[in-house]
Image (tube, rainbow, N blue to C red):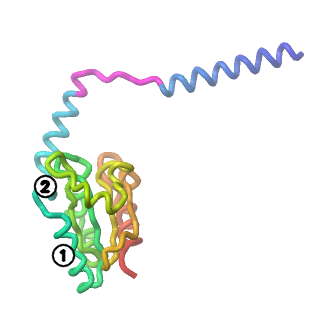
Amino acid sequence: MKKTSLKYFVALFMGFGSIAYAQTEKVKEDPKVIEQKKKAAAAEKAKLPKPYNPKANAQKDIEALIVQAKKENKNIMIQAGGNWCIWCLRFNEFVQTTPELKGIVDKNYVYYHLNFSPDNKNEKIFSQYGNPGDKFGYPVFIVLDKDGKMIHVQQSDVLEQDKGYSLEKTKEFFNQWAPK
């Protein structure tokens, strides 16, 4: 009886091991498919607005945003990323072309696109906020209160849905960090 149980256990264990291995094995994509995907992404990126300015003086811009936020009693939403980042451009386009989101943003935030690129990494600015791009990738969102105090950092992948962003999750994010 014990031999049968041991054999059963070993067989069961080996079965689970092979399933686990099968799930972690990488599937190689056809090079033609990879090339088509790259071309499609490049075409999409070319059509999207480029809101990041590598030549901007981010420190000066953020100081001006704090003055504006105090005056308008709004928080500051910093979308950090770059024109090289398709997900950054997709998010910008999503917010700008979705009236419901644009309304929430315009009512509650002064919005800024903080550039991170080889041309200008804005290392001093990013270090003030704990270098969130290093931790979460791009885009990453830094929420400041009207006095310029950081109140939240949001990674963007939790807002994603398919090849874009979730309206409900994005609304929830913007509403959660709006001034009270």
Q: On the picture, is 65 further left or further right than 140?
A: left
Q: Quadrant of residue 93?
A: bottom left
**Residue type, label 1:** Ala
- Is residue 27 highlighted in magenta? yes
The residue singled out by tag 1 in the image is 64
Q: Residue 59: percent from the left, percent from the top? A: 20, 67
Q: Residue 113: percent from the left, percent from the top? A: 21, 61
Q: Residue 165: percent from the left, percent from the top? A: 32, 54
Mark positioned earlier in the residue sequence (1 or 2):
2
Check the image and name the residue furthest to the front.
124
Q: Secondary structure at mark 2?
A: loop
Return the residue nearer the eye: 105 or 146: 146
The residue located at (34%, 55%) in the rendering is 131
Label placed on residue 78: none
Check the image and name the residue furthest to the right.
1
The residue singled out by tag 2 in the image is 54
- Is residue 132 highlighted in magenta? no
Q: The C terminus is located in which quarter?
A: bottom left
Which stretch appears magenta? 25-34
Circle 1 crowding by C-alpha within 10 Å: few under 14, some 14–19, many from 20: few
Q: Quadrant of residue 40?
A: top left
Q: Residue 25: percent from the left, percent from the top? A: 46, 23
Check the image and name the residue furthest to the bottom.
71
Residue 65, compared with residue 24, is above or below; it is below
Q: Secondary structure at mark 1?
A: helix
